[in-house]
Amino acid sequence: MSATHEEKSFRENVNLTFDIAAATLDIPDGLAYYIKGVNNVYQVRFPVKINGRMESFIGWRAVHTEHKLPAKGGIRFSPLVSQDEVEALAALMSYKCALVNVPFSGSKGGLVVDPKQHDADTMERITRRFAFELIRKDYINPAINVPAPDMGTGAREMAWIASTYAAQKPDDINHLGCVTGKPVTQGGIRGRTEATGRGVVFGLREFFRHPEDVKQARLEGKLEGKNIIVQGLGNVGYYAAKILQEEDGAKIVAIIEWDGAITNPQGFNIEDVAEYKKHQGGIKDYPRGNYIADGASVLEHECDILIPAAMEGVINARNAVHVKAKLIAEAANGPVTFDAEAILKEKGVVMIPDIYLNAGGVVVSYFEWIKNLSHIRFGRMTRRWEEAQNELLLDAMQSSGRPVSDDIAIQLKQGASELELVRSGLDDSMREAFQQLRELYWLNDKVHSYRIAAMALAIEKIALSYREMGVYP
Ligand code: NAD
């Protein structure tokens, strides 16, 4: 969303949070200033012939920091993408990686294109041409800069990018590590597609493990039975909503999409709505809910948890005062603006920030990248060995007169699959990061929100990295 005379730009929003967080830390101004800025941005224009006509496209890849390499961050395809947005998203990636202890710095790419306006063949030519330009300048490279999916892109685009890189750099043995979020058959990792949405759920589960934090949001208990509104049933929103409904027993009482919103106080079956959306292109006229044409107005409906999972700036100075959710879980990047946050805080609304909550994607991207560099699936060498060891243990229990039930024996016998290992690593990363940020929030009087706590932790880790490298003594 671009800046209007009322609203600050996305980058300004990110930088205002940065300034407040940096002021709580004991780091030199010069270092804070250096970390805040974007190190480099590459703008590219290129032509693609579509239906016999030459069309021009413009895109960017921004690198925010380079304290750890590669730089990491998605590529967004949207008609609204801008350099400001790409820079803001690159900065968020640096902070996100630092916060969840993923050894990458931040980058982001964007191409001004509406994927809905082109068929698959045309999108493939556009994607490959954009990738070609970025590869030429090392803005895609397994050691330097590794993209991933974002809004408007997914496994399909990542496979095209990986294949373009392999064609351009046939001698790079690590070519598969040039991009993450690939299909599993093309060097991807099980659990990547769902990772951001599942990470949102792991983050929420961890929040609900801390009664003090839950009480602060004027809530109690667990996720079960909570009324939830989700905006955006795309990659992130779909998986978050599906897991919350199917595994946690939460009720998704409203879904907001580009063509309006649907509500149902009994809660939706997410799979059913997603199936409908896949065939109809939207959620309008979905038969098992009430349709509301002004989708954004549903952000103001009563609920326990509001999950904006579509785009930035949707909760802003204009509508924040009307928001009735008790807890806002920022699944998208930057959905709550800086000004809105102050209004929400005043109203007692608790917010779990994007740089923490949607970090699941980059955590699992990190696992995928490691898999690509090691050229072997996680668990391949240990799974059967683990099973044999567990079998021995069960036999020993049996012969010492302490047998276990068949159900437990089956579970105990199994060695971990790649998917189980990925989910376990993701859960661990999300739990640990929340524990760190809540500790800072509760113990430091200068830190007044989870967002500031998350940002302060991230800045501190990046600053330490630069200092240890000798950049700032
Ligand atoms: P996506 O393109 O898969 O899904 C976006 C969804 O939002 C779509 O269903 C789209 O129809 C819907 N939408 C578009 N305009 C809307 C509007 N005006 N109102 C309501 N819904 C609207 O994108 P995604 O990958 O799910 O990304 C969503 C957000 O999450 C973005 O902010 C992105 O930066 C962030 N994010 C994504 C990932 C990831 O792994 N994909 C990781 C971290 C953060």
Image: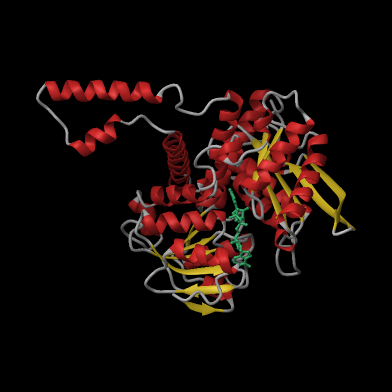
Residue 67 occupies quadrant: top right
Q: As displayed, is residue 13 above or below residue 23?
A: below
The quadrant in which residue 268 appears is bottom left
> At 74% from the left edge and 49% from the top edge, which residue is drawn?
124
Q: Is residue 29 visible?
A: no
Residue sitting nearer the eye, 463 or 239: 239
Q: Position of residue 259 (x, y in %)?
A: 61, 72
Between residues 304 and 392, which one lies in front from this camera angle?
392
Q: Nearer the viewer, residue 161 or 351?
A: 161
* As drawn, 302 above or below 53: below
User: Quadrant of the image for the C terminus?
Assistant: top right
How far across and down, in percent of the image, does residue 81 sit?
74, 57
Q: Position of residue 27 (x, y in %)?
A: 64, 36
Between 110 and 105, the one lying in front of the other is 110
Looking at the image, which residue is at 76% across and 69% down? 5
Residue displayed at 33% across by 53% down:
211
User: Which image quadrant: the N terminus?
Assistant: bottom right
Question: Please, is residue 400 above or below residue 144 in the view?
Answer: above
Where residue 160 sits in the image (x, y, percent)?
70, 42
